Amino acid sequence: TYATQEEAIQGGLNLMSEVWEDNTILLPDDFEWTNPVGKLGDCAPIALGGKLEGVEREKIESPLRTEFEESAERNGYNVPLATSMVSYDQEVWEVLNIKTHELRYVLADEYRKHVVDPPEKGSSKSAMKRPKSRKRPQWELMRVVLAEGKLLTMTPKKGVEYGFVSTIIKAPRDDPYAGLIEQFHITTPLVVLKDTWSEDMVDFLTHPVVAGILMALMLLFGYTEMHTPGFGVFGAIAIFCLVLLLTSQFLVGLAQWWELGILLLGVLLIMLEIFVIPGFGVAGISGILLCVVGLLAMVVPNAPGKLPIPSNPLDWELFSSGLLSLSLGFIASLIAAAILSRYLPKIPLFTKSKLILAPVAASDDAPRSEDSPMLKIQVGQTGQTESMLRPVGRVRFGDDLLNAVSEGGVIESGRTVRVLHRDGNRIVVEEV
């Protein structure tokens, strides 16, 4: 858990390391300590997407418990209370020394034989009769502070009572820094760390849902650009979405240069397959695979020089969410592309804006010469495509090689096409 300084003051949250070292917690004047950010403790390890049990749990919990124990001893805090923030199988008692009246917080298992009429294990009410012994117990049980099966979680007042907090600094909302300045006699201006607008924007762009939407928009507008003549606004939007998708991951450290290189190589192979190499084969498939690998590699965080292979539950969680967002974006783009391929030529917006070539009057663009091969072209005549129609390309009709426009789709090179209509110098064809 982390917070800016201002959020810590407003919400009453202080980092665990600050509590250990400074023994201080910040408390707003009108804040009710039922809010989770106003609590201290509850530090047991958890597993994302699973449960920690048996040896597996002890393997993770043991070093963490030892670290809390050493920190408590080093800073003068109660060890049983500190370790009960991590381990939920401990019962903590408050006991009173009968002779010296010293109060202690102790583990029940360690002091059960030293307490007068201790309760049975797992019960805070019933008592068991102790067999007579020569040595009389020196401690009396005052109360059960924490029952077995629970983790210690403290409010600021409990923190003071248990010795983890020495000072509660009030932070009224009208002047949240007044108590802090007075307590520590601060004379220099406070520097409040806040997320900048650029950090907020990058955080928004790296969200799995947003990444999936950018993926879908990039593919959708790229598909639309391929079905419109020339290069226009749809291609620019597709490139813009790709740039946002790449730079956002790169700025937060989820992407490295070689991962970006794999993705760009995949894009290059796809472009070569579309514009240079006829048909669709090895280059196109390889480009798609490289793009998928590059995008997934950017999602999984990895240290420099190491492969982005998930190695812990958090990595798998990031990998799964990234894969899900990219998959949903890809599926959404396929559905949208299927709809567009059917209705795109009929949408008035595209026709009127000439994003797809609209019919023109024959008198505006009619063949100027009576010998023009255009005059030979008749509706229903067939020809052979000499280049890919995207949607404009070259078609051979007998001995004549002419420009033609496909009716709403891409036609591969070497296919047979039929003339639907001719408007001046514009020939519209469909695949047979």
Image (cartoon, rainbow, N blue to C red):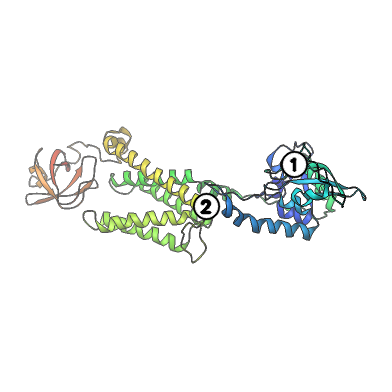
Q: Position of residue 394 (x, y in %)?
A: 17, 50
Q: Nearer the viewer, residue 279 or 16?
A: 16
First in sequence: mark 2 vs mark 1: 1
Q: Residue at x 74, y 38 (%)?
A: 33
Q: Position of residue 374 (x, y in %)?
A: 11, 44
Q: Nearer the viewer, residue 110 or 377?
A: 110
Q: Is residue 394 above or below residue 352?
A: below
- Reading the image, the residue beneath label 2 is 313
Q: Amino acid at mark 2?
A: Pro
Mark 2 in CB contact with mark 1 (< 8 angstroms): no
> In this image, 351 relative to 195: left or right?
left
Q: Amino acid at mark 1?
A: Glu
Q: Nearer the viewer, residue 40 or 372?
A: 40
Q: Position of residue 169 (x, y in %)?
A: 81, 45
> In this image, 166 relative to 331: left or right?
right
State the SS at label 2: helix
Q: Which mark is residue 238?
A: none
Q: Is residue 285 above or below residue 339?
A: below
State the SS at label 1: loop
Q: Position of residue 150 (x, y in %)?
A: 68, 43
Query: Callout 2: few (<14), some (14-19), or many (20+) C-alpha neighbours within 10 Å?
Result: some
Q: Which mark is residue 120?
A: 1
Labels 2, 1: front one: 1
> In this image, 301 relative to 61: left or right?
left
> In this image, 44 relative to 403: left or right?
right
Query: Callout 1: few (<14), some (14-19), or many (20+) C-alpha neighbours within 10 Å?
Result: few
Q: Residue at x 51, y 54 (%)?
A: 315
Q: Residue at x 33, y 59 (%)?
A: 268
